[in-house]
Amino acid sequence: MASTAKQGPGRVSKPGGRVTPSSKGAASKGGSPKSGSPSGSVQSNRYTPPIDRSSKTSPRWFGILILVLFLLGVLIVILNYADVLPGGVNNLWLVAAIGSIFVGLLLATRYH
């Protein structure tokens, strides 16, 4: 039976229902649902080759460099406030410390 309820102002009736096929409908029409998928979506026909593991790993020195840059920045800040660095307490030392920490952070985003 068709619904005779009036629609509110500004509402447009949209025909149809489900646009994408359900997982049950895809399986009955010959499509195979993706194995292990909780949503039961249909498997794509596009092939994506796996990424080579050697291209994903960073060299050992890369992680060590990141830690050294972080620790160097912290050490410069501490030594600056302890008045141990040449030139006394100077803002240029703090700029160098922040720069060192920032470069370490940038390298950390590239680490695999």
Image (cartoon, helix red, strand yellow):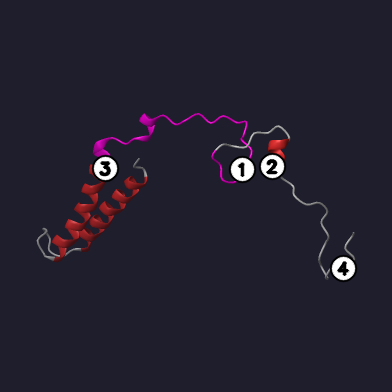
Q: Label 2 neighbourhood size at 10 Å, few (<14), some (14-19), many (20+)?
A: few
Which percent across, then down, holds residue 43?
A: 61, 35
Which percent across, then down, holds residue 33?
A: 62, 37
Of circles 3 and 4, the one toward us is 4
In 3D space, how far apart are the residues under numbered discs 4 and 1 (Cα atoms)? 35 Å
Q: Which residue is mark 3?
A: 63
Q: Which residue is mark 4?
A: 5
Tell me which amino acid carries mark 4.
Answer: Ala
Residue at 64% from the left image edge and 38% from the top image edge: 42
Magenta stretch: residue 51 in it?
Answer: yes
For the stretch drawn in magenta, the main secondary structure is loop
Q: Secondary structure at mark 3?
A: helix
Of circles 1 and 3, the one toward us is 1
Extent of the magenta region: 36-62
Q: Quadrant of the N terminus?
A: bottom right
In 3D space, how far apart are the residues under numbered discs 3 and 4 (Cα atoms)? 66 Å
Q: Which residue is mark 1?
A: 40
N-term-proximal mark, 4 vs 1: 4
Which labelled disc corresponds to residue 24?
2
Tell me which amino acid carries mark 1.
Answer: Gly
Q: Are marks 1 and 2 in contact (CB under 8 Å)?
A: yes
Q: Secondary structure at mark 4?
A: loop
